[in-house]
Amino acid sequence: MNYRFLFYISYSYSIPIGNPLEKEILSRGYQVKWFSDEPDGAQILEDKDNVLNSIQEVMSYNPHILLVSTDYVPDFLPGLKVQIFHGFLTYKRPEKGNSEAHFRVRGFFDLYCTQGPNTTGPFKALSQRKGHFEVIETGWSKVDPLFLHKKRDEVTSKVVLIASTFTKRLSLAYNEDVFNEIKRLSETGKYQFKMVLHPKVPEDIKAKWQSLNGSHYKFYNTTDLAPLFLKSDILLADTTSAIQEFLLQIKPVVTFRHTIKHPYLCHAEQASELEQRIDQALDFSNDLKALIQDFVANLHPYTDGKSSERVIDASIDFLHKDKSYMQPKPLNLWRKYLMRKKLNYFTFKSYNRALTIPRDQISNPQNSIRPND
């Protein structure tokens, strides 16, 4: 059987999410293309040779399965629409009634491939209530490399990776006191610092941190964090979702002014506290280790590096499953209009039910198979 997959992205941080999935898809002999609806994602995709450059090309490609790592996907695109997420549940933007923005259902997806128990449970409850999507726990493709690569060799100096979110009010990257403290600490040689910033952080802020490059500090302009995680002993961060990814290694994290004082993190409120908190985390008590292990068991219990395999299996199985029991998706007229305006593609066509295709119909890559309206 031959399946046509499409990665639908917006920003460059989705590339490390899609790459392990792309490798898995190609290993099975299926087709795969990429498309970005934002310039940031389109720019980084220039290095790939399997990119669709317009929504018209996407329509002509006629994908069977769309793997989506952004919050929205056009309802008028053919194919099963699978949410694979662009980050972990971070607990950094609680909404009204103590709900969490991560669980906002926008009415565009047929299947949610969740990362672990703490996302699967809430999404399944939403699925039962709304009836227009299903949930399958698979683990997250982005972190597969963490469990497939070799660990780094031991070095004398402890390696501290610094990561930051792009939201100004939450980001340590904008804090002058933090900048000066990292500058001071890097000059002592006590630690080896590595620094990475979210791609949405302004270029002048990136340039400022890059100016610290020296014998004990190096700035990396990348969205591929797994190699940096593997080479680091500890993470220093704010509220970035990189925290959850790093914790999967059962390594300590120091946060600067995190919005919630989670017990599995070491918290600092002032830049002057950072050295003490880093040393405390590097001591890595058994109590702290146990708290991290408990958290990870609910976040992402998979350590086999095969989450990409599970996502592809789940997507194909669900494509062929009888879904006549599912409710149609909500009208979402305003959001649908905004998607059409964004892509400058106006059509009355809208696929409001999940695509179902019998297995024996997926054989020729040129087959034109459209979902039921």
Image (cartoon, rainbow, N blue to C red):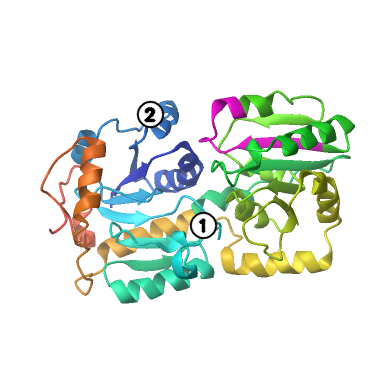
Residue 299 shows in this picture? yes
| Residue sitting at x 41%, y 69% | 123
The answer to which quarter of the image holds residue 81 is: bottom left
**Disc 1 target residue:** 93
Vertical placement of residue 211 versus 142, above or below: above
Q: Which residues are magenta?
A: 192-205
Q: In front here: 262 or 45?
A: 262
| Residue sitting at x 74%, y 56% | 267
Furthest-left residue in this view: 348
Q: Secondary structure at mark 2?
A: loop
The answer to which quarter of the image holds residue 91 is: bottom right
The answer to which quarter of the image holds residue 153 is: top right
Left or right side of 40 for 57: left
Left or right side of 190 for 220: left
Label 1 is placed on what type of residue? Arg
The x and y percentages for residue 20 are 49, 46
Image quadrant in which the C terminus is located? bottom left
Pointer 1 or 2: first along the chain: 2
The tag on residue 49 is: 2
Vertical placement of residue 3 versus 195, above or below: below
The x and y percentages for residue 27 are 43, 46
Within 10 angstroms of label 2, few (less than 14), some, or many (20 or more) residues? few
Magenta segment includes 199: yes
Label 2 is placed on what type of residue? Asp
